[in-house]
Image: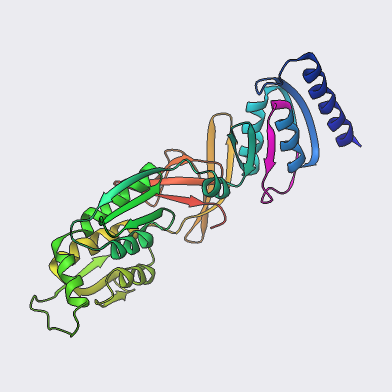
Amino acid sequence: MARRLLRTAVSVLVLVAILAGTPVLADTLVNMEFKEAPLVDVFQILGEIGGWNVLVDPSVQGTVSFVLKDLSVQEALDLVTRTTGYRYKVVGNTLVVATEARLRTEFSSEDFVFINLNYVDVNSARGLLAMVLPQVRIYGDATRNLLVVYGSPTELEMAKQVIKEYDNPGMAVQKAVETASAPQPEEIPLKTEAIPVSYGDGAAIIRSLAVAFPSRTFHWDAQTRRIIGQALDEEWQVIRSLVWQLDIPNFQLKGIMQAGDRSMALLEYAGSTVLLGEGDSLDGWTLTEVLNRSVKFQQDGREFTVVMGR
């Protein structure tokens, strides 16, 4: 009953504005009270008051209860989406509400970068990037030996660094040997190395290395937490870089809380839970940013994002 009355009040407000020839603006102050109201209805009402068309993705579910007083529609949208884990984007005159992943996929505002390849082929370079950065989109132009990579600025910088390490004459020689019509003995001796792993899953890192270097064999020593293998000296430079980038802890994001201008994240790691704020550290990694449904960590130039539910 209360919801029907609220819908009626909103409809009257919109109708009065239209008849008066005055547009309903997104900065109009609102006073609202909801109790266990469907989120879809809440976003629909806020969009109508803001003067937008409204598109709510099917991924938006659940109910909310809150009181809003003297807030603009923009502020109300920010508050509701932030506390419910959803995101919104205004596309033209349409308010779109969905999960962060859906907005990124369907209404992306990603940057892009062109990466020229000098030695390795497009397919092998694209496969390596897809393994290290599975969240970016990668397109290859074999005729120009060029990659086009779409992602966040941080992801693009990492992509350029990976290709810089990978695109060298030594890797081109390896590719020629692998694709020869008949197996040829390698004239350059292989070098044995052991790389320590501080945080990550060594077995999972080896599976990734096997994709990038299918002709090499690697072994995970769980007791010493080291990856042991044999490869060309030029290859070890790339292998060490890949292990360094993949050696990240398995933090699990369990909750996000915000009070005023302070944001906190509840994380589970190594069988324990801990509450962190921006600037706090966990096992040597610093929490740099708390977002709607994800948090970012940094250490020595490395950065990774933990998404809730993954």
Quarter where residue 12 is shown = top right
Quarter where residue 237 is shown = bottom left
Q: Is residue 189 above or below residue 295?
A: below
Q: Residue at x 32, y 62 (%)?
A: 128
Residue 57 magenta-drawn?
yes
Q: Which residue appears farthest toward the right when viewing the image? A: 1
Q: Is residue 269 above or below residue 292?
A: below
Do we see residue 210 in this rendering? yes
Q: Is residue 115 toward the left or the right of residue 280 in the image?
A: left
Q: Is residue 28 toward the left or the right of residue 124 in the image?
A: right
The one nearer the camera, 240 or 4, is: 4
Q: Which residues are magenta?
A: 49-66
Q: Residue at x 37, y 63 (%)?
A: 131
Q: Position of residue 54 (x, y in %)?
A: 69, 37
Q: Residue at x 37, y 55 (%)?
A: 139
The one nearer the camera, 297 or 88, is: 88
The one nearer the camera, 258 or 77, is: 77
Q: Position of residue 307 (x, y in %)?
A: 51, 51
Q: Is residue 33 above or below residue 197?
A: above
Q: Is residue 73 toward the left or the right of residue 176 in the image?
A: right
